[in-house]
Amino acid sequence: MKTFDLDSLVRKNIKELKPYSSARTEYSGAASIFLDANENSFGSPLPENFNRYPDPLQWQLKQEISKIKGIPLQNIFIGNGSDEVIDLAFRIFCNPGKDNVIVCPPTYGMYGVGANINDVAIKEAMLTDDFQLDVEAVLNAIDSNTKLLFICSPNNPTGNNMNRMVMETLINNFPGLVIIDEAYINYSRQKSFIQELTEYENLLVMQTLSKAWGLAALRLGLAFASEKIVDLFNKVKPPYNINKASQQLGIEALTSINQVNENIKITVAERDRLQNELRQFEFIKKIYPSDSNFILIKTSDANNLYNYLSAKKIIVRNRSKEPLCENCLRVTIGTPLENKILIEALKNYKNE
Ligand SMILES: *Cc1c(COP(=O)(O)O)cnc(C)c1O
């Protein structure tokens, strides 16, 4: 097993960075008159005031997350969506024009976009035909400039979990930081890796409030990692990356876990039902197993079916250009009514 040296993984300029010190970082106590941040003391032209800068480290929101996830506050980072977590990982660890990262296509597009924006080379270790990680391909791709490995489980757009033992093997043998993206973990039969953080110091687990929590518009992406890694993210992030409205609404939403669990239950039941229903159509050649809130299907002609559904105002995602996904469409599980309308539309597909 390799030894993990966080210090040697971090870019020199980030190690030496003196972070911006905001007014709220320098004084966070209770005072009655705040004249230190050039805020507008008169208030906002709204029913509620948003004239004060928000908590830079979102402690109250983190407290609610901590309670639900069972993870200590200092191991939680909140990004402006998972997108910000991904971008920060590149900026903290990868020297532009020099370092590289490993991604395992077909997978979430933002890892590659993040790499391209930051001028970081991408090494692709394609998934196997059954959409599992190819251990040899990943290990062979590693060189002395490899900093990050992105694993998405359940994977988007394929929908399946990655084999857990394979993931453990990779974490144990990867010299850089392994980022496991668990955006869909609440729909999965596999348990999260966040309980393993004490086991692996080179692990960062991403989750999000955008999917099972139904808060995509608030942009609340979560990262769980060692305190040292979280400190690096806090140092590099924009001081007020999570706005006040998102913090408040996030806190409020996290008290409604029963409603969220109910919706997850319905989604999973609908996923099973939809998978069964889709079997009746001979133009659907393959229905891939799913541990997420969507199903990938291989069709006889993806473009044609996509256009047919669009004309009926039903929009699915055409993934047929992705590697290993020829003629594949990705269908999000909707409400029971939406799913019923989808099935009815599919029943009429052949007849037109
Ligand atoms: C939807 C999704 C996310 C969530 O992104 P946010 O920026 O948090 O909304 C992250 N990873 C994957 C693989 C996704 O599909």
Image (spheres, rainbow, N blue to C red):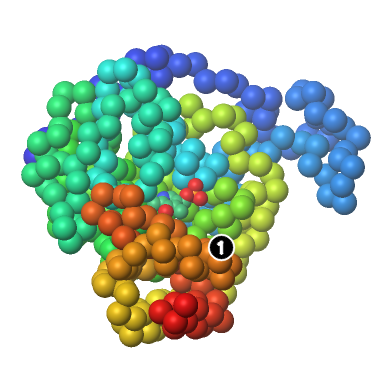
User: Which quadrant of the structure image shows residue 118?
Assistant: top left
| Rendered residue at 49%/16% (across/down) | 18
Looking at this rendering, what residue extends furthest in the front direction? Answer: 352
User: Which quadrant of the structure image shows residue 12?
Assistant: top left
| Image height of 74 relative to 99, above or below | below
Please state which amino acid type lies under the numbered disc 1. Gly
Residue hosting label 1: 214
| Image height of 255 relative to 157, above or below | below
For the residue pair 255 and 135, the one nearer the viewer reads as 135
| Rendered residue at 14%/34% (across/down) | 141
Q: Quadrant of the N terminus?
A: top left
Whether residue 193 is visible to the viewer of this picture, yes or no, is no
Residue 145 location, x and y as percent?
A: 21, 23
Q: How many marks?
A: 1
Residue 219 location, x and y as percent?
A: 57, 48
Say what secondary structure mark 1 lies in.
Answer: loop
| Rendered residue at 27%/62% (across/down) | 161
Whether residue 251 is visible to the viewer of this picture, yes or no, is yes
In this rendering, would 230 be left or right of 57? left
In this rendering, would 221 be left or right of 52? left
Residue 191 location, x and y as percent?
A: 30, 64
For the residue pair 108 and 6, the one nearer the viewer reads as 108
Mark 1 packing: few (<14 Cα in 10 Å), some, or many (20+)?
Answer: few
Q: Is mark 1 within 8 Å of ligand 1?
A: no
Residue 239 location, x and y as percent?
A: 59, 30
User: Which quadrant of the structure image shows residue 272?
Assistant: bottom left
| Rendered residue at 16%/23% (across/down) | 144
